[in-house]
Image: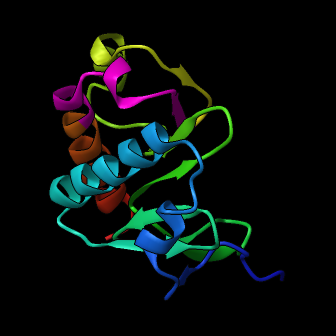
């Protein structure tokens, strides 16, 4: 079975965030790192070379595939900042409706900048997502 490419490592989160060319996105990512750290209770760690993750859990699928993943995280991409939260958590749709300007895919939430969203709603989403994932993977 193939090894997961995105694993927790000892790369420096500040060094990674400082490589973001756009100074506004860079500042947003430092702020987002602080928000996630406070909401999860975990320090920021690099996962792979482009994901900032907080906490971790071990999963095992029926197929036998297993690995570790961050409980919550984000990645600054070219077009948006990608938030990695659970695809299912308490009040997800209601919170997303109050969240502000964003796009979603299965478990990813895309935002252009923090000023487009409601930070208090984000904090509640993070807390609910971590609680949900932690209940599935104790």
* Quadrant the C terminus occupies: bottom left
* Residue 114 forms part of the magenta stretch: yes
Residue 125 to residue 21: above or below: above
Picture quadrant of residue 14: bottom left
Counting from the top left corner in percent of width and height, residue 83 is at 47, 42
Quarter of the N terminus within the rendering: bottom right
Q: Is residue 58 visible?
A: no
Quadrant of residue 125 in the image? Answer: top left
Please name the residue shown 24% across and 22% down the image: 118
Given residues 59 and 129, the one toward you in this image is 129
Q: Please give the count of numbered marks on the rendered protein.
A: 0
Residue for point 43% across, 45% down: 85
Q: Is residue 43 magenta?
A: no
Q: Which residues, given as a range, are shown in magenta?
A: 107-122
Residue in the foreground of this view, choosing between 87 and 85: 85
The residue sitting at 64% across, 71% down in the picture is 49
């Amino acid at each position: 079975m193939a090894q997961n490419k995105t694993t927790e490592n000892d790369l420096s989160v500040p060094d990674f965030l400082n490589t973001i060319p756009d100074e506004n996105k860079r500042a947003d990512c430092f702020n987002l790192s602080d928000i996630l750290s406070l909401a999860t209770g975990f320090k920021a760690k690099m996962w792979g070379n482009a994901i900032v993750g907080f906490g971790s859990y071990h999963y095992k699928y029926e197929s036998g595939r297993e690995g570790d993943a961050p409980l919550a995280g984000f990645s600054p991409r070219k077009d948006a900042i990608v938030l990695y939260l659970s695809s299912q958590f308490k009040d997800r749709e209601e919170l997303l409706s109050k969240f502000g300007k964003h796009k979603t895919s299965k478990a990813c939430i895309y935002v252009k900048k923090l000023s487009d969203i409601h930070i208090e709603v984000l904090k509640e989403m993070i807390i609910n997502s971590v609680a949900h994932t932690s209940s599935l993977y104790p």
